[in-house]
Image (cartoon, helix red, strand yellow):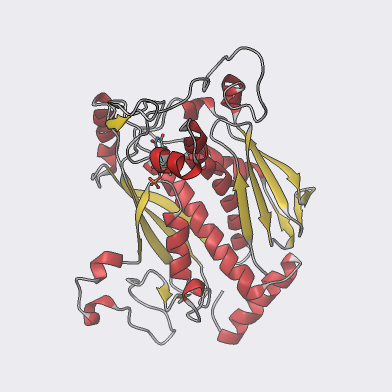
Amino acid sequence: MTLELTTAGESHGPALVAILTGLPAGLRLDRDAIDEDLRRRREGYGRSPRQQLEHDEVEVLAGLRHGLTLGTPLALVIRNRDHETWAWGMSPWPPGGEPEGKGTRPVTLPRPGHADLAGALKFGHEDVRDALERASARQTAAHVAAGAVAKALLRELGVSVAGRVLEIGGETDDGAWAHATDDARRERDTLGGVVEVVADGVPPGLGSYAEKRDRLDARLAAALMGIQAVKGVEVGDGFALARLRGSEAHDEIERDRRRRTNRAGGLEGGITNGEPVVVRVAMKPLPTLMRPLRSVDLATGEPADALVERSDVQAVEALAVVAEAAVAWELAAAAREKHGGDALSDFVGAHRAYLERIRWPR
Ligand SMILES: Cc1cc2nc3c(=O)[nH]c(=O)nc-3n(C[C@H](O)[C@H](O)[C@H](O)COP(=O)(O)O)c2cc1C
């Protein structure tokens, strides 16, 4: 059984859409839990005023009846509340009438660090908005909603996933994060940071070494690297391991097959080993600067300042939620591959039988 996710939606279009296939029937979903993750994604000290405007709520169009999945495609929608002000500019059909609201004038000033230039060249867009609307991290709301569903599935197996911030703007002291963000805002600059995601209760045996594509560490890295502004991923102690000797780097195996250390981050040979899965993610400083970098006007070919548009100073707290969703999704997908099942009870039953076989305490 393969768990798959397809999303659609522009940042200021009518809505974001997610279609999830491969879920078992009979999984109970909690609307408040999904909305709570959407709320967590919007929050954070460095976010733009748009995040206060947006009030994301999930709507379900298919695949759910009376709170239980039907085992058919689950279709989720999150409306973009501020689409109203972009109704002309982002109208899916030729808008007609006088241009009004936002997005009516073409964007021709690509931002260094954003998808603007490469996206416009690749797709032949004269209005950079045609690239930036989908490249924008607004689409991560759809992934967070899907991640909330994945977490509900994982909970049935006793697995929990949590993301947290480790660093913002090079500061590891959480007391300094608000100051660092204020300083950057005052200087009309942006910050990046580091987040960590830990999954507890993960059984041994998710993922495989059979092929590169089966390795769960590789899948996690791809899923995390697929998030906007992520430029580095480490599994366990990652880069620090490169500076140690083998005798210091590996996690010795005890009689109960558990480890006293977890430098491997719960993954050996691309397979979970029964220890918590630990990954860290590095986010670059956001590319939209209120004091813009140098660019070129694509309409005239002349040097110009890059586009300035309402933007976050930093979004590291939000990244922690988005990365948590990505890890949950990949773990849930690996568990579906391993245990299959059309009904939730088939899936959970296969998981329990497997734990019996390997005599792994629940
Ligand atoms: C949760 C989140 C929020 C973001 N918010 C912004 C933002 O407000 N302004 C901005 O310029 N980039 C923001 N980004 C990053 C850009 O979307 C990203 O840098 C851009 O799409 C280019 O992709 P790349 O950095 O992966 O190469 C955000 C990223 C995430 C994960």
| Numbered marks: total | 0
Quadrant of residue 224 within the rendered picture:
bottom left
Can residue 159 be seen? Answer: no
Q: Residue 110, relative to residue 324: is it above or below?
A: above
Residue in the image at 30% along x and 32% along y: 295
Q: Quadrant of ligand 1?
A: top left
**Which quadrant is home to the N terminus?**
bottom right
* 241 lies left or right of 70: left
Q: Which of 56 and 40 is in front in this view?
A: 56
In the picture as drawn, the residue positioned furthest to the front comes out as: 300
Q: Residue 136, relative to residue 307: is it above or below?
A: below
Q: Residue 312, relative to residue 340: is it above or below?
A: above
Can residue 313 be seen? Answer: yes
Residue in the image at 19% along x and 71% along y: 243
**Which quadrant is home to the C terminus?**
bottom right
Q: Nearer the viewer, residue 306 or 125?
A: 125
> Residue 198: image x %, image y %?
43, 60
> Residue 187: image x %, image y %?
23, 26
> Residue 148: image x %, image y %?
59, 51
In the picture as drawn, the residue positioned furthest to the top comes out as: 98
> Residue 271: image x %, image y %?
47, 76
Q: Nearer the viewer, residue 7 or 142?
A: 7
Residue in the image at 25% along x and 38% along y: 176
